[in-house]
Image (cartoon, grey):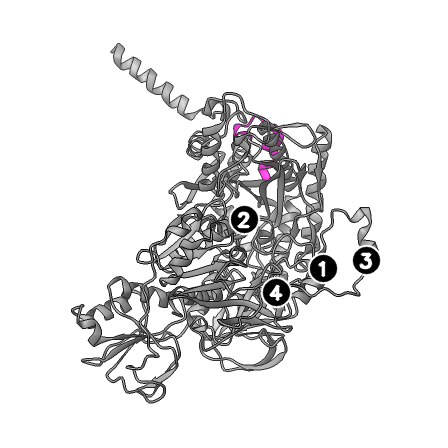
Amino acid sequence: MKKILAFYLFFIGALASHAQIKSPDEFLGYELGSHFTPHHKVADYFRQTAAASAKNMKLIEYGKTNEGRPLMVAVVSSPENISKLEQVRTNNLILATGTNNTIDLSNQPAILWLSYNVHGNEANSTETAMKMLYTLVSGDNKPAAEWLKNTVVVIDPCLNPDGRDRYVNYFNSVVGKTPNSDPSSREHIEPWPGGRPNHYYFDLNRDWAWQTQIESRQRLALYNQWMPQVHVDFHEQSYNEPYYFAPAAEPVHQNITSWQKGFQVVVGKNNAKYFDAEGWQYFTKERFDLLYPSYGDTYPLYNGSIGMTYEQGGIRAGLSVVTNDGDTLTLKDRIAHHFTTGMSTLEVTSLNHQKLLEEYKKYFQQELANSPGIYKSYIIKATNLSRLKKLAELLTKNKIEFAFGGDKTGRGYDYDTQKEENFSIARNDLIVNMQQPRAVLANVLLEPQTFVTDSNTYDITAWALPYVYGLKGYASKESIKGKFAAIEEAKIINTEVEKPLAWLFSWGTSEDVQVLTALQKENVKVRQADQPFSVNGKDYPAGTLIVLRAENEKIIRGMKDKIAFIAKMLDKPIQAVSSGFVEKGKDFGSNVYPLLKQPKIAIVSGMEVSSLAFGEAWFFLEHDLNLSPIIINAKDLNNLDVNKVNTLILPDGSYSAFIGDGLTAWLNKGGKLILMEDAIEGVLDKKGFDIKKKEAAVKKDEKTDASKLLFKNKDKDDFETTIPGAIYKIDLDSSHPFSYGLGKTYYSLKTDRKIYEPFIKGWNVGLINEKSLMAGVVGKKAKEELKAGLLIGVQDFGRGQVVYLANDPLFRNFWEGGKTLFSNIIFCGY
């Protein structure tokens, strides 16, 4: 009996212990700010707190990272609001429809969403999130308990667990018994690639709209189920900087409302009140603008919220660092600052919750009644069905409404000619009508020219989706609606020919590349048409893939079934033909149908390489093309075996010291070298490489503007030479294999002033001229320098090739037209 009683008392004690709400210090076993906490312990703390405080919070695990770490949010409010949480969420979504409704706003709480640690090495944020959670659920903070009566707070403790653990694991492995505050100490110097990006080295803070990464897709799916009134994105900047909070700097997009801008000021003043009381330094209205649509502040703003960025000085500060001013900045200081702005924002949100909800409701009603901008409809032609489908997927992820086809004709702004032109609508053309709840976001993503009030922008200034996807598009001032909900699909498989001479596959998309790689993995020999041809009354463009039955049946049995299986597995149409005698073009026995090599790809990584550029290539090859590249270091460039690696990618980086005889010998034996952006600089003036930089012409009569030499302008950039990110139309050699699926033009994002002389010997695949600028901000001098020259070139090098790409075709993995170009470069053109 005594044993049973003891067990019972132990069991009750265990339950009581389990139910106790512990502070972060109690749970972790150390004072918050004295160590960096690994992500698994943060997740455990959130789970333990949820179990102990079910009446005040709900934990939602919304996904996992590439490395399997959990993604979660804590939804915190008063017990009354938590008890009706699903109704709160549903009511809030009704407000975002823009329709008239009878929801009682006086009983509806506002939603405040706090996002922490999107950049992994801005690591104070997640520590702050634990403190924020405890403060809100413990009940010890009486003002907070009152604020939660009319506010629901969503806390995402870490948007980028993989990157954060990369940083935390490094720091914890090198820090000594006592942190070294000297900034030259190794604990303040991260190894490549650093903790900022995710597993694939992507900057998740620039992925909100594009959702190329798994973390973004899962987070935005949840975000769009809640649609908060206020969103704060917590960051860190250089540890020598003071704190930044809203209001933001110019340029501010013209679709951001006066209410949204004004409420940023309200929040900023409240933050300032608390910082002033402590004597903490801060700044506002500088550096961080509201233009690029894929940030953690702009994306919420374009979706009716009050979106804001808060920046604490602290990147690579570790636990303690001495700043340039001689002060010592600690992790505890950084936590205190982020915690203060978080609580301040909760206070303002709570005190203004009624007005926030009223303006939120009005925002979406106005979108339905009066669409933003001058254009009422956007028509995207089905010039490439695969890329059009991907555009439709992007719009769907962002809850933007669209339809297909119709029988109307109209007139609108032609993205290509930049003039008003007539158009007609075909069955599969995609139409976005601006009379919809997400009209602002749709307009921001589709408008041909983004109005920019200030050239001092923090990011790119052009991203119009028809250019991004390489599709013909029109912006119309007429309200046009599509007639069909879905694309009319082509017939998937045609293998009616009993004993075909050949099977034909299309070319020009990532899906087509997947077909090619699947065939090559089965050792199927695949040829490609260098010229257009016609057979059985049907026209086929250059680039079409051809599988000849006879030459493959010598080594592969059951070719017909294998071809049919691959086509069905990848959902790709094929055409079987019984004769190689073509009606137009060259017969199949001609040398214009060369065999395609199976690429054996290596990518260079390491300190010499931009981690973002490397990540783009790595991710694209693995996820878009189903390829498994070898990852090598720059020091191994001269030790390649062409039988093991026949295609080498040098992403944006500095390679001059590594370009040697071994690499040129590899080229001479048949290697293909792809140089991207600054990688080109590494071969300038190297023997055998014919590329030459085009130098800017210097005007002898050009005088210095004396006003620019004033001391007050010492911190201003020379905007005449800047090009933060503009779209150029590149004229392609349409006969070259790199143009397959693109045609005569390719829209490219240009982010620097580098341009090269056209080849005298070689292939000038992509050139620009004085009319090539399509959209975006370009300084006067930069515009002059970019009037004409080479941006895509190829030269033969012995039996091999060198490909020069002055611009990044894989920019943040959302530049779909560039993916077609890069696929061509990988597989075609020998």
What kind of residue is marked 4?
Answer: Lys
Residue 694, numbered circle: 4
Mark 2 or mark 1, earlier in chain: 2
Determine which residue is flagged by label 2.
205
The answer for how far apart the CA atoms under marks 2 and 3 are is 38 Å
Q: Is residue 226 above or below residue 42?
A: below
What kind of residue is marked 2?
Answer: Asn
Determine which residue is flagged by label 1.
720
Q: Would you call the spot at circle 1 few (<14 residues within 10 Å), some (14-19), or many (20 or more)?
A: some
Mark 4 or mark 2, earlier in chain: 2
Give SS at disc 1.
Answer: helix
- Regarding residue 203, the answer to whether it shows in the image is yes
What kind of residue is marked 1?
Answer: Glu
Answer whether labels 4 and 2 touch (C-beta < 8 Å): no
Q: Pick whichever, 530 or 430, lies toward us.
A: 530
Q: Would you call the spot at circle 4 few (<14 residues within 10 Å), some (14-19), or many (20 or more)?
A: some
The answer for how far apart the CA atoms under marks 4 and 1 are is 18 Å
x%, y% of residue 581?
28, 87
1 or 3: mark nearer the eye: 3
Mark 4 or mark 1, earlier in chain: 4
x%, y% of residue 169?
45, 33
Determine which residue is flagged by label 3.
705
2 or 1: mark nearer the eye: 1
4 or 1: mark nearer the eye: 4
